[in-house]
Amino acid sequence: MSTSWVITLQWGNPLISFRPSSHFLPVLQSARGLTVIQPICCKTKVLNSVSNIDTVVATDDNYGHKEVISVNPRLYDYLLANVREPEILRELREETATMRGSQMQVSPDQAQLLAMLVQILGAERCIEVGVYTGYSSLAVALVLPEGGQLVACERDAKSLEVAQRYYDRAGVSNKVNVKHGLAADTLKSMIQNGEGNSYDFAFVDAEKKMYQDYFELLLQLVRVGGIIVIDNVLWHGRVADPLVNDSKTLSIRSFNRKLMEDNRVSISMIPIGDGMTICRKR
Ligand SMILES: C[S@@+](CC[C@H](N)C(=O)[O-])C[C@H]1O[C@@H](n2cnc3c(N)ncnc32)[C@H](O)[C@@H]1O
């Protein structure tokens, strides 16, 4: 593989890729009807197959020449084809797809990761903040041992009806303790009930502006060595765009920045779904 500059012009679908001379780059502007695709307007390794060009986002000096990829639709289809999604989760996902807000549900690969983390931890006591129709909570409940418990916090009764139906069908209702109401209130009362430091795992996927509050409360409820996973930390890529400054983006950006400096946890931000950060309590 050689190293060179690649420009792809797009009009709807990718139209043309070519390698301009370096002095041509500064004058290349978006032309009417033609968009310069930014991620590959950097120094990029040219791969044998043109189809790989739009998946490689970085191989340059800044990244130690490590080949970093982004996921395009074809690659994502491949990834999903390699997810082991239990039948009951597939049915719930398909039913939810007909409902308002279905885009809020975690993706099958995210749910599989959550279940894997619960299994690696040997978690028995879990919390979910933001249940919706139950896809991620069911993924967790399915791998909990007998006697394990998931406290499922959700304010929307209609969504909970769907979730409860699937807990029943999957035979895990005995493992799920549904808390209908505002999640912060539920977490505060759990702390008041003396449940601090007794949970192994928590997943946060509710009100974005409340992330810092949820995190502080969960940090009291989770034991040392326990895990808190936060969803949507990349927020459709908006967190990295300095021109986007709406209130939700600002609060997630601020949450991410504070987490970077928070010595109470070890962290790992991963580009799965809309971005997740795994925090391990120290
Ligand atoms: C992104 S969805 C959760 C998706 C879910 N984890 C799944 O995979 O299907 C967010 C949910 O959080 C709920 N929610 C938002 N704010 C909340 C709050 N303050 N208290 C409890 N639930 C809340 C919403 O009603 C919504 O159902």
Image (cartoon, helix red, strand yellow):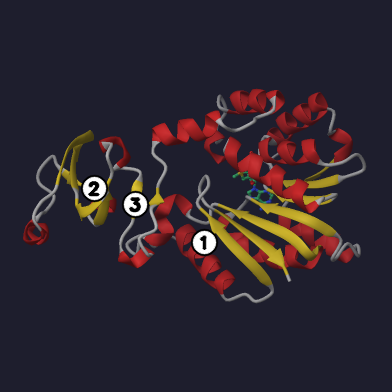
Q: Quadrant of the C terminus?
A: bottom right
The residue lying toward the viewer, choosing from 100 and 226, is: 226
Going by the numbered disc 1, the residue's amino acid type is: Ile
3D distance between C-alphas at marks 1 and 3: 24 Å
Q: Position of residue 42 (x, y in %)?
A: 24, 57
3D distance between C-alphas at marks 3 and 2: 11 Å
Q: Residue at x 71, y 25 (%)?
A: 88
1 or 3: mark nearer the eye: 3
Circle number at residue 57: 3
Earlier-in-chain disc, 1 versus 3: 3
On the rendered structure, is 238 left or right of 30?
right
Are there few (<14), some (14-19), or many (20+) residues within 10 Å of tag 3?
A: many
Tell me, yes or no, whether the two marked residues, 1 and 2, touch with CB atoms within 8 Å.
no
Count of numbered tags: 3
The residue lying toward the viewer, choosing from 253 and 162, is: 253
Going by the numbered disc 2, the residue's amino acid type is: Ile
Residue bearing the label numbered 2? 37
Q: Position of residue 123 (x, y in %)?
A: 81, 51
Going by the numbered disc 3, the residue's amino acid type is: Val
Residue bearing the label numbered 1? 252
Dividing the picture into quarters, in which one does residue 162 lie? top right
Q: Which structural element holds mark 3?
A: strand
206 is higher (above) or lower (below) than 211: above
Q: Which structural element holds mark 1?
A: helix
3D distance between C-alphas at marks 1 and 2: 26 Å
Can residue 106 be seen?
no
Can residue 20 be seen?
yes
85 is higher (above) or lower (below) than 215: above
Q: Residue at x 83, y 58 (%)?
A: 199
On the rendered structure, is 166 left or right of 95?
right
Earlier-in-chain disc, 3 versus 2: 2
Q: Position of residue 266 (x, y in %)?
A: 65, 68
